[in-house]
Amino acid sequence: MDTSIYTAYADYEWAIKLNRICLKMLGIWPKNNETKWEKLMTNVRVIVMLNIGFWFCTIPSVYSLLRIWGNIMSMIDNLQYTLPLTMATIKFFIMWQKKKDILPLLNMIKHDWLKPKTVQERNVMIKRARLACILTIFGYFIMLISFFLATIFPIFDFSIRYLTNITDPGRLVPLQTYYFYDRDKSPFYEITYILQSIGMFMVAAAYTGTDCFLSLLIFHVCGQLENLKARVIDLDKFNNFENVLSYSVQDHIRLIRSINIIDNIFAWMLLGALFYFGILFAFQGFLIVSMITQHGDVSQLRLIFIMTVFINTFAHTCLYCTVGEILVAQCEGVYKAACECKWYTLESKKARELLIVMIYANKPLYLSAGKLFPMTMATFCNLLKTSGGYISILLAYQN
């Protein structure tokens, strides 16, 4: 095998490895030439995992929320689990249903890593992929901390939740849930505890894995746009101007299509994530302010868990808007590069051909939340401002 091809393949494996491990475990990593038997077994695994998370975690948590409705502290404690569980289940299901749409994107990533490229282009791709890897490692780290805090300590009768006789009349379990059977009796208690832990791990992996996969896709596209920008700026330096321009136009159209596919896959997830973050941020902000102003008796473990969930939620939503902002900046960069290209030194025919790039690049491209809101830092700041306003309403309601 050619050394350059081997190096390119090693780069490709490094770039996607962490995301592939998580999504493959969940059964939502698409494969080329998948046999009917492999597809069947993957679908069975996904259905089993979705049912465990849905029937033993999400539904019992929602039913428990209805039972304690009106008790704001119990509701906040419940929503810290119910909202992420619901959101993660939705993400898991959408990713499973969109596997055919995701596969061309993965093939594009593989093609981009394996095709011949300059040292500068490879360095840009490595830089973007490294950012995605760092975010992935951080996301999995926070996920594992939250998971262990929620599932390990109740075994030793240490709870990180807000406990009342209504929500937890018997033996402790990780989630605030209500079942139609007596869960405190053996072996129902042990089975429920194990299934809750499995369900929580799967939905946590789906929640974090989906967001990290989105960052991988966007950072890869941004790297390709950055390389395209550098190529457009130097168009006048190429002897084979027509060939390079034709390739640049085709490459730009390909990236635009990829962005549209990504937006179609993740639009409703991002809309749900904005509503979820807005609600949870207001409730958790109220909880933290109440703890500071009223000096409530809160255990250190519960305080650590609240802060972990808050940081995790904040980081994920900030990630959505940050990658969206970077994408907008890169798309605008291609347009500016076309405008800054020394078109006035070109022949009139070549200058007219350059207009094709300008026309395509002039259209703004961004991720959207449900095709309604652009995922940018301006949207994130507005969401923080709105959610922060509801904290004062909750404090007034408490008083």
Image: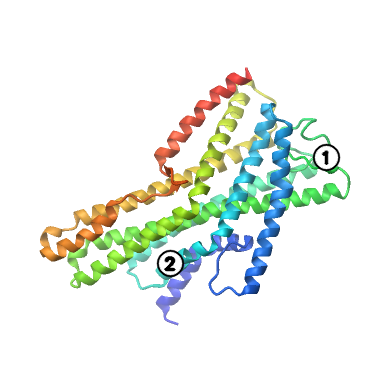
Query: Which residue is at the front of the view, 120 or 76?
Result: 76
Badge 2 marks a residue whose secondary structure is helix
- Residue 134, image x, y percentages: 50, 54
Is residue 232 something one can see in this rendering?
A: yes
- Marks 1 and 2, the one that precedes in the sequence: 2
Horizontal relation, residue 322 to residue 225: left or right? right
For label 2, the crowd category at 10 Å Cα-Cα, with few meaning under 14, some 14 to 19 and many 20 or more, is some
Residue at the outermost right position: 186
Q: Which numbered mark, 1 or 2, is in the foreground of this view?
A: 2
Residue at the outermost bottom position: 1
Horizontal relation, residue 355 to residue 42: left or right? left
In which quadrant of the rendered image does the C terminus lie?
top right
Which mark, by number, is residue 108?
2
Q: What type is the residue that disc 1 sits on?
A: Arg
Residue at left 19%, top 63%? 353
Which mark, by number, is residue 171?
1
- In this figure, what is the number of numbered marks? 2
